[in-house]
Image (cartoon, coloured by chain):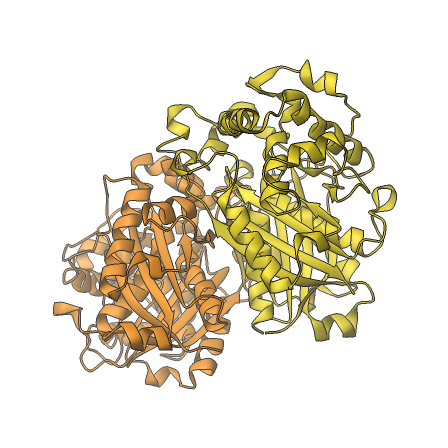
Chain colours: A orange, B yellow
Amino acid sequence: MEKVCVLGAGSTKYGKLEDSITDITLQASVDAIESAGIESKDIKAGYISNVFGVADKQVHLGPVVMSNLGISDRPSLSIESACGSGSVSFREAYANVAAGFYDVALVAGVEKVTHTGTEWTTTYFSYCSDFFYEGQSGVSFPGLFASMARAYMNEFKATEEDFAQVAVKNHDNGLLNPKAHLRKKITVDDVMSSAVVASPLKLYDCCPFSDGASSVILCNEKFAKDHGANYIEVMGSGRGGSSAALQGREHLTTIPSTKIAAEAAFKMAGITPKDVDFAEVHDCFTIAEIVDIEDLGFFEKGKGVEAVREGQTKLNGQISINSSGGLKSKGHPIGATGVGQIVEVFDQLTGKAGERTVKNAKIGLTQNFGATGASCAVHIFQSV
Amino acid sequence: MEKVCVLGAGSTKYGKLEDSITDITLQASVDAIESAGIESKDIKAGYISNVFGVADKQVHLGPVVMSNLGISDRPSLSIESACGSGSVSFREAYANVAAGFYDVALVAGVEKVTHTGTEWTTTYFSYCSDFFYEGQSGVSFPGLFASMARAYMNEFKATEEDFAQVAVKNHDNGLLNPKAHLRKKITVDDVMSSAVVASPLKLYDCCPFSDGASSVILCNEKFAKDHGANYIEVMGSGRGGSSAALQGREHLTTIPSTKIAAEAAFKMAGITPKDVDFAEVHDCFTIAEIVDIEDLGFFEKGKGVEAVREGQTKLNGQISINSSGGLKSKGHPIGATGVGQIVEVFDQLTGKAGERTVKNAKIGLTQNFGATGASCAVHIFQSV
């Protein structure tokens, strides 16, 4: 196996974007290529992460992206794993570079949905649940995560105010990220007084629907050494699954796929959760971040909420969680999200994170899941 | 690199199916698992090939498929590359097994669209073109392939009757395939008198929209030897790309991605086109099959039409092309198509092809592309 590096990273702003799905993918990819100091012709394959290309009338995005980059002869494909598509796409590119099939690959994640309106997005996103058991019964994702939140409150004496702290922290971080969707300072009171979406979750417990594109360039170590001054290494990569429907799980306060993926990634990296300096985790709802940081092993089960309460997950706290602002504030363009997490890790570990820099960070982790965690991928990176 | 084998294969009938997208995927996958003589728990990862899950309200198919197979903890993902999704999914699974990431993987291709009606399918399929240049101008796939057909007629003195011969041959083969969609003998006159869709292509020059699912089990050689009496080996695998829009190509009578993919696959296999006994090729329109068999090197450029005229591509002719009936008669459930081609090769090389058996066949090839060939994958298999 070859050692795999991330040589460049780029991203559009997340939010409501006017340009087409193909244009924003191109913008992020050109940024990544320039950041890597390579030319597009160095790229041997393209991995596109996207869920609802139909929303902007472009499916089969790969050849369009490659053609726009002037490398139409190169193979490409699109990967979908709901909200976890980005990290799964990265994993496939990683596997192919590690195995020596390509020396350089592009991973581009993108989503363009805000123009369709809330009814379209809510309906189509529900197709990412186990539709037979969940979506068609009217249970959409806020309801499913509300069930997890209620179970967590019952089991571990957490309060709605505790969940609100996650939103407040991530908005604080997002304020320092020029590319974040919701750059607005909020308070616990703001969260508590926002409209109830699915009790106990309120509007400010939920991430937004966003447009956006994020791209990274992967390569083997030889190429990285030859071409890039600033690159990071992939230390570990793991994937896992959970029952597609929430009703098939034994517990509502843990996501099995995260634990499986994390165990594999830590094993490959040869480190433990204590060695991680910062992490981008999947906070589609505030409760999710608390469950994530426990499943990843940063805190014991039931103790994640205490860590949040005590500010241990704030920027430059014990472990910085979602320095980018996370899905909650940075935004959640679903196909782009998992790739965007890796962009944040790249920026942090190569000194490009500006005001939101995690001090002395050497090791960063990303965790990104699909639906209620039916699929998950975890990646661990280190500076060189 | 590990040697990769196909240990089992299964398929639903192609056509208009009543069961849900998840049910037909399960049916084909259980068939493949039984054919392989393994248990579902032997499968370490699932690769789902699908384009329009939205049509049956189920995106994020991977975890649903894995949950239905009782292996919800295993990683899965969906891959889309338009009509070439199936062969690209196989390629990703191949790469992961070859690299040693998994010893056994499932590839399941599926599409369920006929219930949506022709307007929906035509509209949504046009999103697989380069929509900015093609789809939004009203150029759908019959029009694009008609341009290729017209160019081929001009350049190589082919006639509409020549194209019709492809349809007649593939219907003859499909009659021998119990799982084919259009099992109906047709004549050149039938083709010539069918409704004009996009001149010179008529209705019987076009493959149908189909529902269907096809699955295969891949594994490394050690697992195959330990578990299966009947398996085949992957000799070669190649991928390539072409300009997404047809207008970006230098010639209309060749598909660059096929040539690139075939060259890579033949190089890996260490054989030449002359060594191939039969091939499943992408005959979405009759003209496509003629272009394919030239681009794959079975016949010189401009000579494919003569081969068809002389019956060289008939079952047990010089080289049997589309013994299954091809997309034209067997049907074209887009996400399933490329996987279904591999099911046919498996059945042929393991003595399960019944009346349509290619005699003394040892080496079979599959070629499956997306859109007008913007993406393509070629795989070569041999009996053991």
Q: Residue at x 32, y 81 (%)?
A: A276
Compare residues B15 and B39 and report the one nearer the observer. B15
Compare residues B60 and A296 and report the one nearer the observer. B60
Q: How many marks?
A: 0
| Vertical side of B90 occupied by B141: above or below | above
Q: Hey, which residue is sitting farthest right in the picture?
A: B355
Q: Quadrant of residue A290?
A: bottom left
Q: Quadrant of the C terminus of chain B?
A: bottom right
Indicate the position of residue B326 as horizontal and vertical percent values: 69, 38
Horizontal side of residue B319 vs B376, given as left or right: right
Q: Is residue A244 visible?
A: no
Q: Is residue B119 visible?
A: yes
Compare residues A227 and B118 and report the one nearer the observer. A227
Q: Quadrant of the N terminus of chain B?
A: bottom right
Q: Quadrant of residue A150?
A: bottom left
Horizontal side of residue B27 vs A63, given as left or right: right
| Vertical side of B24 occupied by A218: above or below | below
Q: Residue at x 40, y 30 (%)?
A: B134
Indicate the position of residue B381 as horizontal and vertical percent values: 70, 58
Indicate the position of residue A32 as horizontal and vertical percent values: 27, 60
Q: Residue at x 44, y 25 (%)?
A: B139
Q: Residue at x 55, y 41 (%)?
A: B83
Horizontal side of residue A310 vs A237, given as left or right: left
Horizontal side of residue B37 vs A7, given as left or right: right
Compare residues A204 and A99 and report the one nearer the observer. A99
Indicate the position of residue B19 as horizontal and vertical percent values: 68, 39
